[in-house]
Image: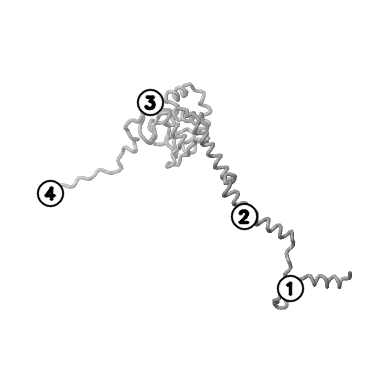
């Protein structure tokens, strides 16, 4: 078959729409079967997928799996027996020693930015005097380190440091009390006794009234 006859046979298969524009014809040939197959498969997936994952089995979605795993983890953590640490236990461990070197390193790594490397106080309070904001007992220190003081910008270390590391940091803070330091920050909070209980005595700068005494009115003279 020559080129001319092949061209004529192909032209017979072409379906042309009735309208034209500037001599341009629009053909109306059917799409290839493979293209239509891919199209209809895509349509079917687009319908089935959201029904399958968002209606029938939402737990199979990635974020749902994450939520379920986190809920299971939280339940497992909640089921663990809570370790009750008493003041006596903390004090006994404090006096036993063996924590000083690791606690000093942990303090410099995590606390020096706000309290200075020598615990003399900067943004945070000075730990060498007898004045404390949240109490001077070991359990007070453990609680503050665990929970932080967000309104003052202190980060909670629960989950960041291990429980033993937090206790050792508390021991280190307690060990600084009464020791000398150069250029300490002024006292903050209230004074505590030897056991760490508050004494009703505010820090010196808080006790001073900022108001000047009122002047007496002059006595009128005749």
Give the number of the disc on residue 79: none
Name the element at disc 4. loop
Query: 151 or 62, which lies in front?
Result: 62
Q: Identify the residue at horizontal 45%, vertical 22% (top origin).
A: 92
Q: Which residue does the numbered mark 3 point to in the structure image?
A: 195
As measured in the structure, the alpha-carbon distance from the residue carrying label 4 to the one carrying label 2 is 101 Å
Name the element at disc 2. helix
Image quarter of residue 186: top left
Mark 3 or mark 1, which is nearer to you? 1
Q: Earlier in the sequence, mark 3 or mark 1?
A: 1
The x, y position of residue 69, in whole percent, is 56, 39
As measured in the structure, the alpha-carbon distance from the residue carrying label 3 to the one carrying label 2 is 70 Å
Give the number of the disc on residue 16: 1
Q: Identify the residue at horizontal 53%, vertical 28% (top origin).
A: 102
Contact, mark 4 vs mark 1 (Cβ under 8 Å): no
Crowding near the residue tagged with mark 3, few <14, some 14–19, many ≥20 C-alpha atoms within 10 Å: few
> In the visual, does 126 lie left or right of 102?
left
As measured in the structure, the alpha-carbon distance from the residue carrying label 4 to the one carrying label 3 is 60 Å
As measured in the structure, the alpha-carbon distance from the residue carrying label 4 to the one carrying label 1 is 121 Å
The x, y position of residue 201, in whole percent, is 32, 33
Mark 4 or mark 3, which is nearer to you? 3
Q: Which residue does the numbered mark 2 point to in the structure image?
A: 47
Crowding near the residue tagged with mark 1, few <14, some 14–19, many ≥20 C-alpha atoms within 10 Å: few
Name the element at disc 1. strand
Q: Which residue does the numbered mark 4 point to in the structure image?
A: 221
Q: Identify the residue at horizontal 42%, vertical 23% (top origin).
A: 88
The extreme left residue here reads 222
As measured in the structure, the alpha-carbon distance from the residue carrying label 2 to the one carrying label 1 is 34 Å
Q: Earlier in the sequence, mark 3 or mark 2?
A: 2
């Amino acid at each position: 078959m020559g080129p001319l006859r092949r061209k004529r046979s192909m032209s017979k298969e072409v379906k042309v729409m009735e309208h034209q524009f500037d001599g341009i014809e629009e053909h109306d040939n059917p799409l290839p079967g493979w293209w239509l197959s891919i199209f209809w498969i895509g349509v079917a997936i687009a319908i089935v997928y959201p029904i399958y994952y968002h209606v029938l089995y939402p737990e199979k979605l990635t974020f749902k799996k994450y939520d379920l795993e986190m809920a299971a983890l939280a339940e497992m953590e909640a089921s663990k027996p809570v370790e009750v640490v008493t003041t006596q236990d903390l004090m006994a461990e404090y006096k036993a020693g063996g924590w000083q070197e690791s606690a000093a390193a942990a303090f410099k790594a995590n606390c020096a930015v706000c309290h200075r490397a020598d615990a003399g106080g900067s943004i945070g309070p000075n730990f060498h005097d007898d004045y404390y904001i949240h109490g001077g007992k070991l359990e007070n220190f453990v609680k503050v380190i665990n929970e932080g003081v967000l309104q003052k910008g202190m980060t909670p270390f629960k989950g960041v440091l291990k429980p033993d590391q937090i206790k050792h940091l508390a021991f280190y803070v307690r060990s600084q009390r009464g020791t000398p330091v150069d250029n300490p920050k002024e006292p903050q909070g209230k004074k505590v006794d030897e056991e760490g209980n508050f004494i009703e005595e505010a820090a010196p700068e808080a006790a001073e009234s900022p108001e000047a005494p009122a002047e007496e009115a002059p006595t009128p003279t005749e």
